[in-house]
Amino acid sequence: MDDFERHLDTQQCGPKPKEQQCQIYNAKMVASWVKDPQGGDVVSRVQNIAVGLVKEMALRLERQEWLDDPWGIPQETQARRLRAT
């Protein structure tokens, strides 16, 4: 939360938004999908669900940068994380 508030301050976003205004997807909904195992790698499935939801919201909000980088992290960090798994 501190990082998020710092981001809002540095980006001069104006009044602090309410939590529901910042939520890209419902984490509890995604967690409920995980509780219903369908076999396979659960972590990969959750990642795919989350990225799909971010992309869906990007289309709805016309945020092309989210489609280009749904993780919101630099490509080199993503590559390092993939190599570690």
Image: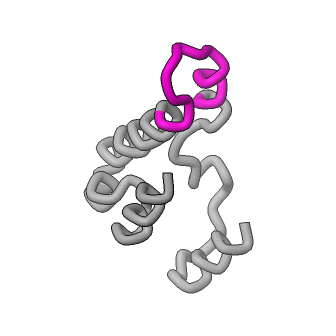
Lateral position of residue 70 relative to residue 16, left or right: left
Residue drawn at 53 percent across, 14 percent down: 38
72 magenta-colored = no
Lateral position of residue 42 relative to residue 16, left or right: left
Depth order, front residue of 41/61: 41
Quarter of the figure with residue 74: bottom left
Identify whether 9 is placed above or below 22: below
The percent coordinates of residue 31 (x first, y second) are 65, 30
Depth order, front residue of 37/15: 37
Residue drawn at 51 percent across, 81 percent down: 11
- For the magenta stretch, what is the residue range? 30-44
Residue drawn at 66 percent across, 20 percent down: 35
Identify whether 36 is placed above or below 10: above
The percent coordinates of residue 52 (x first, y second) are 39, 37
Give the overall secondary structure of the magenta segment: helix
The percent coordinates of residue 64 (x first, y second) are 26, 57
The percent coordinates of residue 22 (x first, y second) are 57, 54
Depth order, front residue of 13/85: 85
Residue drawn at 42 percent across, 55 percent down: 82
Depth order, front residue of 17/50: 50
Indicate how the structure is coloured in the image: one colour
Quarter of the figure with residue 69: bottom left
Q: Residue furthest right?
A: 2
42 magenta-colored = yes
Lateral position of residue 29 relative to residue 1, left or right: left
